[in-house]
């Protein structure tokens, strides 16, 4: 069964108190992001960072901080990351809209509640994507009813995955995804739009400041969703699909668990 490793980090501070002119500087934006990789590739991430540091001649640090890079090096790092087998999610909040927010059930927002709320939004998007990816990679049928429910989701990653699955023949009926007459290149559906054009799911024209770049990528039929490649990458031999451990943190190789697993599977008289 495919498993995932999720790396999470944030930028900015989660403080949402009203600004004080003479008070400490607070960022206007708070961003929390996740990088999702196959569990088998989790250790490769260290090498990815090392390669990026070498590419930008940052040889004196194991860390890579985007804010410290020049514009050309930022673009170089992004291109390198874009070639890696990973999926990236980000939740960005403009905190000025939250500073005086009051919830009748929770009261006024504080930094802890705000941080946890952003983290929840991020994890919802990650788990939605992992769930669908898991269904597809395990060959579980995506029924017409499930496909219809997935199409109601406005998560661009989910919709892009649905379109990619249909293009690969993994979903029988064409998904009911409405894209419109113009495909935006800078809104929250940019990934869905690019996958739709690259796979032939839509023939609508791109619009927006990145239209030329998106036309170039779509014209080359860039495969942004490669389900079969992932299936091949997560086929380690001798792996059980379901853990038989009782608690989730002990090893599958622990012989003490065999009796529990056998007892649990026996029918009662």
Image (cartoon, rainbow, N blue to C red):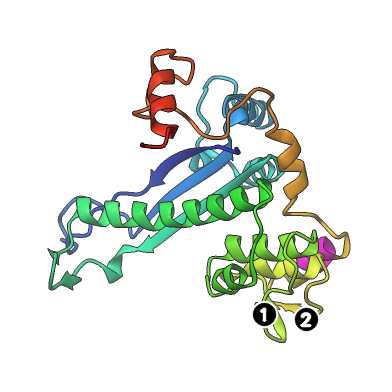
Estimate the x, y position of residue 248 in percent, counting from the top left: 38, 29
Say the numbered circle drawn on residue 179: 1
Q: In the depicted view, which residue is nearer to us: 11 or 189?
A: 189
**Total of numbered circles in the picture?**
2
Q: In the depicted view, which residue is nearer to us: 223 or 11?
A: 223
- Taking the spot 74% from the left edge, 73% from the top edge, the residue there is 173
Q: Which of pointers 2 and 1 lies earlier in the amino acid sequence?
A: 1
- Taking the spot 74% from the left edge, 74% from the top edge, the residue there is 174
Neighbour tally class for label 1: few under 14, some 14-19, many 20 plus, Cα within 10 Å: some
Task: Specify the quadrant that holds the N terminus.
Answer: top right
Can residue 245 be seen at all in this image of the molecule? no
Q: CA distance from mark 2 to mark 1?
A: 8 Å
Q: Secondary structure at mark 2?
A: loop
Residue 115 placement, left or right of 220: left
- What range of the chain is rendered magenta? 212-218
Disc 2 to disc 1: CB gap under 8 Å: yes
Neighbour tally class for label 2: few under 14, some 14-19, many 20 plus, Cα within 10 Å: some
Q: Which residue is mark 2?
A: 204
Task: Specify the quadrant that holds the C terminus.
Answer: top left
Estimate the x, y position of residue 132 in percent, counting from the top left: 58, 55
Estimate the x, y position of residue 119 in percent, counting from the top left: 35, 51
Q: Is residue 51 above or below residue 33?
A: above
Judged by its main secondary structure, the magenta piece is helix
Q: Is residue 235 above or below residue 112?
A: above
């Amino acid at each position: 069964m495919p498993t995932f490793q999720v790396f999470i980090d944030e930028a900015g501070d989660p403080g949402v108190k009203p600004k004080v002119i003479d008070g400490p500087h607070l960022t206007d934006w708070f961003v929390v992001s996740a990088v999702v990789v196959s569990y088998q590739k989790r250790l490769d991430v260290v090498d990815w960072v090392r390669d990026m540091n070498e590419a930008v001649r940052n040889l004196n640090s194991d860390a890579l901080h985007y804010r410290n890079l020049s514009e050309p090096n930022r673009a170089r790092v992004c291109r390198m990351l874009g070639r890696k087998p990973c999926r990236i999610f980000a939740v960005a909040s403009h905190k000025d809209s939250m500073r005086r927010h009051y919830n009748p059930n929770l009261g006024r927002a504080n930094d802890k509640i705000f941080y946890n709320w952003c983290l929840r939004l991020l994890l919802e998007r990650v788990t939605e994507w992992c769930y669908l990816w898991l269904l597809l990679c395990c060959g579980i049928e995506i029924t017409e009813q499930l496909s219809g429910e997935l199409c109601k989701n406005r998560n661009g990653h989910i919709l892009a995955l649905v379109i990619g699955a249909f293009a690969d023949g993994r979903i029988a009926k064409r998904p009911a995804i409405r894209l419109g007459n113009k495909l935006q290149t800078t809104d929250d559906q940019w990934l869905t739009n690019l996958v739709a054009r690259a796979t032939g799911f839509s023939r609508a024209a791109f619009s927006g400041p990145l239209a030329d770049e998106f036309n170039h990528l779509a014209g080359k039929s860039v495969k942004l969703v490669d389900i079969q490649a992932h299936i091949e990458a997560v086929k380690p031999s001798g792996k059980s699909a379901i853990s038989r451990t009782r608690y989730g943190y002990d090893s599958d190789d622990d012989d003490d668990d065999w009796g529990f697993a056998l007892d649990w599977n026996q029918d009662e008289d």
